[in-house]
Image (spheres, rainbow, N blue to C red):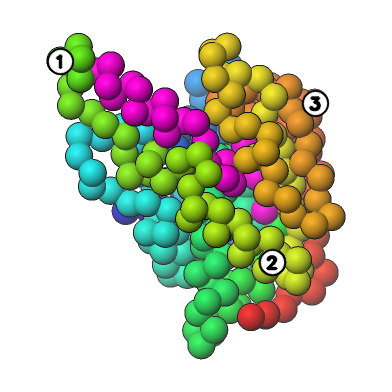
Amino acid sequence: MAKIVLRSDSDEIKDIHVIFLHGLGGSANSTWLKKGSKDEAWPMWLVEDNRDLSIWTVEYSAPKLSFNSTGMGIPDLATNIFEHMLKTPQLSEGEIFFVCHSLGGLITKQILRIAHDQTNRVEAQQFLGRVSGTAFLGTPHLGSDIALLGHNLAARAILKCTTLLKPSVATASLSRNDPNLRELNTWYKGWSSNAPIRHLILTETKKMYGVIQVVKPDSADPGLPETRAIPIESCHENICKPVDREDEIYTHVKGFISQKKENFMSYG
């Protein structure tokens, strides 16, 4: 079950909501820590730099490995999280930005598709009309080699007879060139070209642990019109972990969110 937690001041809900979604194997806390820190969450820097924001994090289960094939893939995770958002009173008004790491970006795209498809549901259309922008940080729009890596790790574990772990449902859904991911991205490109939504796309350029580039450039760039992907000198694990407020990751996200949406609207 997903949890949506308000991280900023609950006594004063602002008109602009920034919702952070972690990725595969991440969490609502650890994913968003400043690089090298065990307790400093960098999303709170945004509140200090812009008092008009309310900061939210989403917690959901997406382990890399599991003991069985149970769990939720992208459509189920998106539906679960979306329904929680609609039932969160403080999120019923105001502009919305999503900041997503890895799998979190795919879930966000699916959330927007679910909202778009519910044409007869007023609250879904109102929600969609309030979404101003999405920041993708290392999102595998066309899948990732991490799924293959998960299979290899599971195979090694089995050979060592230490566990019967295998790739989780969430990991399996990230298979490179997965047809479901291609179809979701095709839909998203078409929808976003006609929707009043802006994007920030940051792509990793370094290998994690010096071994594997988790999200390669062709998958990290969804090919959205009028939006250029920005390469960052970072690996997949750290592309969501700025070092300080001068770090380009933070300055890109901060600048992106500062571009407010002037008018809310519904669209289908």
- Residue 135 location (% of width, % of height): 68, 47
* Residue 245 seen in this snapshot: no
Which residues fall within the magenta stretch?
134-157
Q: Nearer the viewer, residue 261 or 76?
A: 76
Residue contact between numbered discs 3 and 2, judged by CB atoms under 8 Å = no
**Which residue is painted at 62% across and 60% down in the image?**
186
Residue wearing tag 2: 190
Amino acid type at mark 3:
Glu
Residue depth check, mark 3 versus mark 1: number of the one nearer the observer: 1
Amino acid type at mark 2:
Gly
Residue wearing tag 1: 161
The span from disc 3 to disc 1 (Cα, nearest Å) is: 47 Å
Answer left or right for 19 relative to 84: right
**SS class of the residue under badge 3?**
loop
**Which residue is painted at 46% across and 42% down in the image?**
174
- Residue 127 location (% of width, % of height): 58, 72
Task: Find out whether residue 14 is within the magenta segment.
Answer: no
Neighbour tally class for label 2: few under 14, some 14-19, many 20 plus, Cα within 10 Å:
few
Residue wearing tag 3: 246
Q: Nearer the viewer, residue 71 or 259?
A: 71
